[in-house]
Structure formats: C-alpha cells, structure tokens
Amino acid sequence: MSFDILKKLEWRYATKKFDATKKVSSKKITILKEAFNLTATSYGLQPLKLVVISNPKIIKDLVPLSYNQGQVGNASHIFVICIENSIDAKFIKKYFDLVNKARNTSRDILKSYEDYLIDNFSKKTDEEITIWAAKQAYLTMGNLLTVCAVEEIDACPIEGFQPDQYDSYLNLSAKGLQSVLVMAVGHRSVDDAFSELKKVRRGVDEIVIDLE
C-alpha cells in the first residue's frame, strides 16, 4: 500500500493545462470536500471554508483575477480556500458545542480548555490570527493535493491570484471570509508538456535529518 501511495505522488504534478472537455465526477468532488473537512487543523478549530466553483462563467471570470493563468480557465473545478475573518469567543464556543454534541462530553469537562482558547485568542492581534488561520489553509491544501493524487485527479495549487479581487467578485467579504489559496482541478490535457517532465526533488538523504 505504501508503495502505491508513493507511485501516486510520483504521478501527480502541478498541472498547467487541463482538458476542458473532461469534468471531474461529482463523486470525486465529494471525496475532496470530505477530505477538506477531515483535514487536521490547530486546536481542531477549522477556521476555514472551501468555495467549490464549477460554473463555467465564474471560472472564466476568475482567469484575469489569476494573472491570466491558463490552468484556471480550462479546469473542471476551482477550489478557493478561505479563512474566517472572525475567530472570537463566539466562534470558539460554537466549536465546543460541536465537541459536546459529537462526543457527549459535558461542558463542565470542556470548560477549562474552552476558557483557555478564548483567553489565548483574545490576546492575539487580528494580524496574528490571520497568519495562524492561513497556516491552516496550507495544511488543507497539502492534504487535498495528496487526496487528488490518490484519486488520480489532476490539480494545480495556486498562490498567484488577486485575493482582494476574488473576495470582491465572489462576495466573500460579505460572508466573513477572505481567500488565501486557489486550487484548480480537472484532468490533464494530453498535450501538457509538463506531464512528461521528470520530477525534480532534492532527495530524501538531503532534506531528512534522522536523529537515532
């Protein structure tokens, strides 16, 4: 099984040209949505939301907001990973309501940890919270890319876009969100030259330090 996973990771690459005639199935998209929801985040708070776009017009309109990158325009779906603008006591209390419901753990037991998190976040600046939340977005991106590889869904992670323009066009600010990362998904075009290039990595011996 582990060898199969490594083969899948060798197979994946940052797709530069998708086949616009091939759409990712709704079943596969559902798997990616579930994987997003199951991704680990700091404290389990999930300060994120995922916008999944399949509407061709919206995708087309996002191209100029993504520095005219072709993989945006010919993707099957565009995933926009967003962070919540308000991580406050109310948000944290809502999380502990979920813990209480899912695990049937009394609020008395949860209270000390809940109070700790509320106090901890109340002392952070808005900038510190934004940076923290953005780190969680990167965690989900990494997980989604791995799941895409396992499911043989082609994908391209994108930082090169205009967040303010995305937020305005997709009305994210009104939803209390701001875009952090974009991921285009689809199926690679047969004439995407990048699909044939050998993967370049520094090597395990160079980037891993074993302390035995």
Image: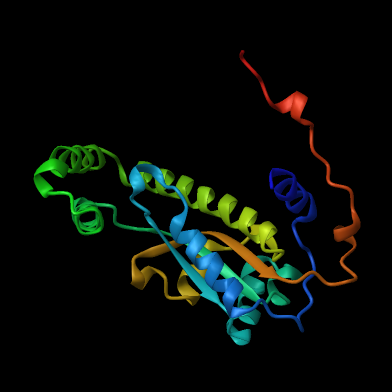
Location of residue 145 in the rendering, given as x and y in whole percent from the top left corner: 63, 56
Which of the two residues, 16 or 39, is positioned nearer the viewer here?
39
Which of the two residues, 29 or 207, is positioned nearer the viewer here?
29
103 sits left or right of 155 in the view: left
Q: Residue at x 90, y 70 (%)?
A: 191
- Could you say which quadrant of the image residue 83 lies in? bottom left
105 sits left or right of 57 in the view: left
Farthest residue in the front direction?
Answer: 1
Q: Is the residue 130 above or below the residue 182 in the image?
A: above
Which of the two residues, 89 or 195, is positioned nearer the viewer here?
195
Location of residue 155 in the rendering, given as x and y in whole percent from the top left corner: 69, 63
Farthest residue in the top direction?
Answer: 212
Location of residue 75 in the rendering, given as x and y in whole percent from the top left corner: 69, 74
Q: Residue at x 74, y 57 (%)?
A: 14
Q: Is the residue 88 above or below the residue 179 in the image?
A: above
- Could you say which quadrant of the image residue 159 lies in? bottom right
Q: How is the image coloured?
A: rainbow
Q: Residue at x 39, y 43 (%)?
A: 42
Farthest residue in the left direction?
Answer: 108
Q: Residue at x 70, y 49 (%)?
A: 5
Q: Is the residue 156 above or below the residue 168 in the image?
A: above
17 sits left or right of 126 in the view: right
Please tell me how many numbered marks the rendered image carries.
Answer: 0
Location of residue 163 in the rendering, given as x and y in whole percent from the top left corner: 52, 62
Regarding residue 204, the answer to whether it shows in the image is yes
Quadrant where the C terminus is found in the figure: top right
Regarding residue 159, the answer to whether it shows in the image is no
Which of the two residues, 202 or 165, is positioned nearer the viewer here?
202
